[in-house]
Amino acid sequence: MTNKQRLDLIAEYIREHKYADLHVLASRFETSLSTIRRALNELEAAGVVRRHHGGASLTGEAGAGGYDFITQDDTNAPEKHRIAERTAQLVHDGMTIMIDGGTTTYAVAKAILNKRLIIVTNSLPIAALLNEVSACETVVTGGSLYNRLGVLCGPLCESALGEMHADLAILGCAGLTAEGIWNSNALLASYQRKMIQRSARTLFVADGSKLGKRALTLTTRHEPGFTILTTVKPPGFLKKSGCEVLTC
């Protein structure tokens, strides 16, 4: 395959899917990550795509919304990578995992995709990633699409979750305070509560920017069975929360 042919195929793929992950592209076109990075750099220089940490989107597709999946992909990327690598150490072959949507949990999915797991997710970007390159069995909930994050939510999603059980739920959040764990939307908080209910353990992954921050909806109060993984020294309120707190 010539370089031009590869560029044309990658551009066609991104036009169809709007966003593509480096690992997905490398697997699909049977080439190295470095080759894909160079191709995306050329396509960006030509004005075809916009590069992001870990992938690229079609030019003009990234919206301005605060929780838009694509535009948020670059935010605190090094911290999300550290969280993902540390989370992978807590996940072992044979486990059933529930993962919700968001850029931090997407980074986690990339870090665990070579493990033999059953992964239940309501995130379309995570499902697409796992479908292309993963050794995992992937179960996708039904539900109504929340476009800004690419997640399924609502009664159908929660009904499906209610029929399942997981060893571990890995969840993101919009904020962490002494009161508890927050999310930006009541629908998101509702399915997260169901994931907590249906999992033996719950891990919240949050970069340092989330600490001390409230959002629209309080998802849950702190509970002794929760683990919180973050990238900064935990503030006093977390130490007193009763949760297990890990840093990376």
Image (tube, rainbow, N blue to C red):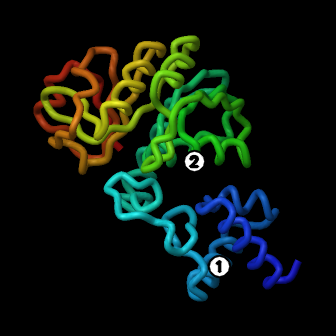
- Amino acid residing under circle 2: Pro
Q: Quadrant of the N terminus?
A: bottom right
Q: Mark 2 or 1 closer to N-term?
A: 1
134 vs 62: above or below: above
Q: Position of residue 32 (x, y in %)?
A: 73, 67
- Residue topped by disc 1: 38
Q: Quadrant of the C terminus?
A: top left
Give the distance between the C-alpha atoms of the residues marked 2 and 1, in whole angstroms: 23 Å
Q: Which residue: 56% across, 85% down?
A: 47
Amino acid type assigned to the residue bearing label 1 in the image: Arg
Q: Is residue 103 visible?
A: no
- Which mark is on residue 125? 2
Front one among 21 and 11: 11
Identify the secondary structure beneath mark 2: helix
Q: Quadrant of residue 245?
A: top left
Find residue 247 and name its label. Answer: none
Up/down of 10 relative to 123, above or below: below
The image position of residue 98, as x and y in percent, is: 53, 27
